[in-house]
Image (cartoon, rainbow, N blue to C red):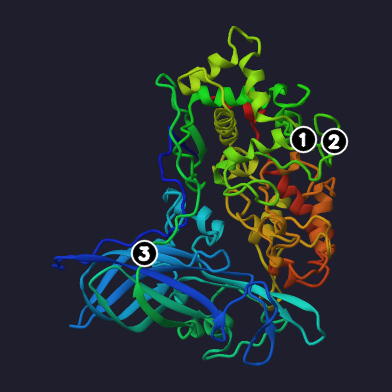
Amino acid sequence: MERHSALSLSGVLVFIFLTWGGLAAGRAATSHHALQVEIRPRFNKAPLVFDSLTNTLANGQKISVTRLDYLVSSFALHQRDGGWLTLSNRFAYVSGREGRNWFRVDAIPEGSYDRIRFDVGVPVQENHEDPAHLPPDHALNPNLNGLHWSWQGGYIFLAIEGDWLRQNGKRSGYSYHLATDRLLRTITLPVALELSEDRELLLGLEVGEIFSGKHRIALSEDTTSTHSREQDELAGRLQENLAGAFVVDGIQKAEPKPLVGASRQQVEMAATARLYRYTFARYFPQPLLPVDNPMTVEGVELGRRLFEEPLLSINNKQSCRSCHQPEAAFADPRRLSLGAEGQIGSRNAMPLLNLAWKKTFFWDGRSSRLRDQVLQPIQDPLEMHETLANVEKKLTHAPSQAGLNYSNLFARAFGTPVITADRIARGLEQFLLAQVSYRSAFDRSLAGETELNAEEKRGFELFNTEYDPRRNQLGADCFHCHGGPLFQSQSFANNGLDEAGKDLGRFGVTGRPGDKNKFAVPTLRNVALSAPYMHDGRFETLEQVVAHYSSGIRPSPTLDPNLAKHPEKGLNLSLADQKALVAFLRTLTDTRRALEKTQP
């Protein structure tokens, strides 16, 4: 049921792909080089502009592309003297919209090559293995790629989503997910590669060919989605079109790619500090814990004290806990939180659970590290409205509690009594990372300790079944955004709350028009405790939330395609099915008492 980790020392995630290695046995070579592969998405030979409803298919239809994610495996090079050099059992994850378009193939013998070969998808063995053991930075880790089918098993090989324009001028959505062993697609391309130094191979992915290659795909009510079931002709046509979508653009001298991500800082840890026993469910993906802030018993305890400390606010009256109450899943029962001086906040306080599996923080994702996020509410004029310099001074001179003052606590955690903003952030980071929720009635049912009732089982079935009338699938389609054992995703989505909201969400961070009205997709674990709901707290009950998805969806240019492909107002679920969904969501409540009391 559980997995334990004294300390995860996996590398900090950076903007690179898993490097290929492991040459075929028996190959003799005196020199080896790297091949850097970049795949550039385009449409009708022009660079693909994501989120724009301006791409014209061969049949004249207008579409946009809002997601282009896929997995690559089994890269091979063909030698001019006749043999294939296969670099197997290695994988890359490519995400076009997010600019994750390149990977490296290392340790290739010097020589002349005239063809390349790779698969879009995952080989049969790896496709059916349990991914929970994979390192957090592995291309097949579900928390990294968001392309695993979760409870159904197996990977999505290619996900392409977006909008299309109906004849009546209204927008609709499409969602194409190619998966299952039968749809593994091998791509073979001619090249003229002389590998005497590190080189970069430039490939193009003609997205238009996926729709208009060997088979012309006309978007209609019957062709808005595919999930690659047996006898699914649409999936087969898309897969065949994919074979002609890749082209070689050229080969050039390799230039170093920038590493983007959290840089490592100096490790601060007292010599006497005890490593924290990190515990989570056996079916959770491996988390990416910070290597430069090892979790210790003393560090977590310091963080707990800081989380409850009102000295972090300007008037010494408000703590982090004031707006993130453990009994409310570390959220705020109020629609909008009040600041230390009575200021009204602009958004609902998010729950703070299972943060080790998050890549960005806040509703708009403006912080990429939890350690940076925790300092922002302290300084925000609408929240605690204090300066970090004042916080350092106040904590340094705070009176002792239970025989310990903050200087003692910082020394126990970090080795010296010096109190700095960075150490405050590290302590809070450790405490919040320790808040792991994985012991709900749903989890106990997976372990065979209890059994869900008929209504709860129906809710789970609805949750994990797409809405696809073409295949007589009439589910609630929840899993696209809240899939997997974490019941969350790393993406940002417009879930149809407003046609044009005043709060533009992710757009305020990226400036990309396609991000307007998009917000982070929070976990549904303990969702029954974290009311009210949505970024503005507009819904007071789970029943209201489910009713929104059933009949309250408002169309807009950035509405998530997995909602836009549905009937205009939503799924129109029966009252019995809505009730079953709520019953299932209530099974995700952790059965332990206040999570902050979890012991190391």
Q: Which residue is mark 2?
A: 343
| Kind of residue at disc 3 | Arg
Labels 1 and 3: the sequence-earlier one: 3
The one of 480 and 19 positioned closer to us in this rendering: 19
Left-right relation of 232 to 379: left
Q: Which residue is mark 3?
A: 104
Labels 2 and 1: the sequence-earlier one: 2
Q: Nearer the viewer, mark 3 or mark 2?
A: 2
Labels 3 and 2: the sequence-earlier one: 3
| Kind of residue at disc 1 | Glu
User: In this rendering, is residue 238 above or below 425?
Assistant: below
Give the percent coordinates (x, y) of residue 122. Answer: 42, 67
The answer to whether one can see residue 207 in this image is: no
The Cα–Cα distance between marks 3 and 2, rounded to whole angstroms, is 50 Å
| Secondary structure category for the residue under label 3 | strand
| Secondary structure category for the residue under label 2 | loop
Left-right relation of 298 to 388: left
Q: Residue at x 45, y 29 (%)?
A: 268
The Cα–Cα distance between marks 1 and 3, rounded to whole angstroms, is 45 Å
Checking the image for residue 598, the label placed there is none
Q: Give yes or no for contact between labels 2 and 1 (Cβ–Cβ under 8 Å).
A: yes
Q: Residue at x 69, y 61 (%)?
A: 511
| Secondary structure category for the residue under label 1 | loop
Checking the image for residue 383, the label placed there is 1
Give the percent coordinates (x, y) of residue 206. Answer: 52, 82
User: In this rendering, is residue 19 above or below 447?
Assistant: below
